Image (spheres, rainbow, N blue to C red):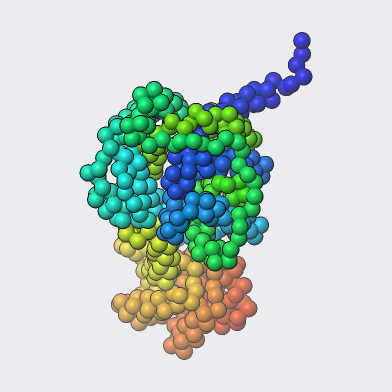
Amino acid sequence: MSSFVDPDSRRSLVRNLVAGTTTAVVLIPQAMAYALVAGLPPIHGLYASVLPLVVYALIGRSRQLAVGPGAIDTLLVGAALGAMHIVDEQTYAAWAALLAVMVGAIQALLGLLRAGFLVNLLSRPVISGFTTAAALTIALSQVRHLLGFEAPAGSGFFEIAGNVARSIGDIHGPTAVVGLASAVALVSLKRWRKNFPGPLFVVAVSTLATAWLGLEERGVRVVGDVPAGLPAFQLPAVDADTVLSLLPTAVTLALIGYLTIISIGQTFANRNGYEIRPSRELFAIGGANFAAGVSQGFPVSASFSRSAVHAGGGATSPYALIVVSGWVALTLLLFTGLLQHLPTATLAAIIITAVLGLTDFPEIRRLARVKRADMWLLLITFTATLLVGIEQGILAGVASSLMLFIYRTTRPHAAVLGRVEGTRDYRNLRNYPDAITLPGVLIVRIDAQFYFGNVTFLREFLRRQEAELSAPLRAVIIEACSLNQLDSSAEAALRELAAAYVARGVALKFANVKRPVADVMRASGLWHLVGEHNIHMNVHDAVQSLDVYEGAD
């Protein structure tokens, strides 16, 4: 009997159902755990894992991206709201929801404006340094839950460390046993079989053990009553003062959330041979965050580990996230009663084992070999995040990146060239000390765009190189292959330089001038001042024309 359903479509449907179910098994305990990091009751983690996933599935195009609460986002939420010293739990939850709406609005607006390029301000070393420091901060913040002692939450690594050090003597034995056993089990299960749903297994076993052994009566803290039912859908109250106080955190979350989803999404898109559009993904995650805000959630992004589980489970469509959302909704409707005996120490163990995998200390050693300046960027961001806080650490990293970029462009790499014997190739004399040079002829290459920031550098570089010549300067040839742009300040400097060389009887020639630079030179009159006969296709032609020109004299 023939089937009405195409076999390939049926197989794809089954694969996505399996992938969605597998991801839900991982997401449910993680979402509850991350809610604790954000300073919220665990139920809000489940609220943030229903509607946002559906919205992303309808708009986004990544087939393997596992949207939901993430470690860095929840830490930022907890740090920002914790610093405001909000006493009332309902107000805290409302502000977390408002923050999600603001993040969603910023991301959606940037997506509509196709402004995803702004995320380039967050370079890889900055993100690596920030993530490593944030992971350590998150892990340390959960030690009090893991070992069962009372300590103020704190808003920075060293404040948390001080609170933990002062209270470490008050460890609660039964809680510590549950927490440490959960952590050991999670690590062991992951090493035994990566695809095994370790978090769900540990949640189930610790919950049953707590209920059976009566550990709650012995002082082990549990999640307690979890309200059943789907979240109420409403727009959080908007207050101008609150919005202004949350705005810096919202902007930071919007950029970091986008960077997270685009880096993970692009990784899996490349692996599986399809394309995603950054601006659309930015709009999609913005919609997901807005959905989180109107459904009593908090800001969401994505998780690489969950995305790997999602992909490994067979996800081939964004709609697999709807399956994940369905399982979370079913849990909210039917199974919340099973979670009331879940120890918070187990959730803390899930968080700690998850976030410690985000640390990236090997990157420091790699950058020390590859690019030492980038290593210092990582260390500056890492140190600033630990010393002064999450947002300030990111800002310090971004500021350091911009300063390094400005320094590099204002003092770009420059080379004096000579001809490699037997060829028409001209190379850096530092790398080819036997290259042939001509007396009084200076051939230079500037490896950067020429703009107002490095005008002074070019003048000084030419002056220094002229002073080192063994014969009087007769000609300067600028290899322009690396000059992509020429602004008005740089053009004016070149015009002054050309006029000064003409007055001294020094020939100024250009080789390999690109079209954008040539257009500026023609429009400004610099092309005419230099002379058509002094613009050449390559350095060798410029040198040959120089010899012919001097011979005619």
Q: Nearer the viewer, residue 380 or 248?
A: 248
Residue 172 visible in this rendered orientation of the protein: yes
Q: Quadrant of residue 217?
A: top left
Q: Quadrant of the N terminus?
A: top right
Q: Is residue 248 shown above or below 189? A: below
Answer with left or right where residue 338 lies relative to residue 218: right
Q: Is residue 253 shown above or below 60? A: below
Q: Residue at x 34, y 52 (%)?
A: 152
Q: Residue at x 46, y 72 (%)?
A: 478
Q: Residue at x 59, y 68 (%)?
A: 516
Q: Residue furthest left?
A: 169
Q: Quadrant of residue 486?
A: bottom right
What x and y, as percent, mark residue 252?
Answer: 49, 58
Q: Quadrant of residue 456?
A: bottom left
Q: Residue at x 49, y 68 (%)?
A: 449
Q: Residue furthest front?
A: 217
What x and y, as percent, mark residue 448?
Answer: 46, 66
Q: Residue furthest bottom?
A: 503
What x and y, as percent, mark residue 419?
Answer: 40, 63
Q: Nearer the viewer, residue 43 or 368?
A: 43
What x and y, as percent, mark residue 428?
Answer: 37, 63
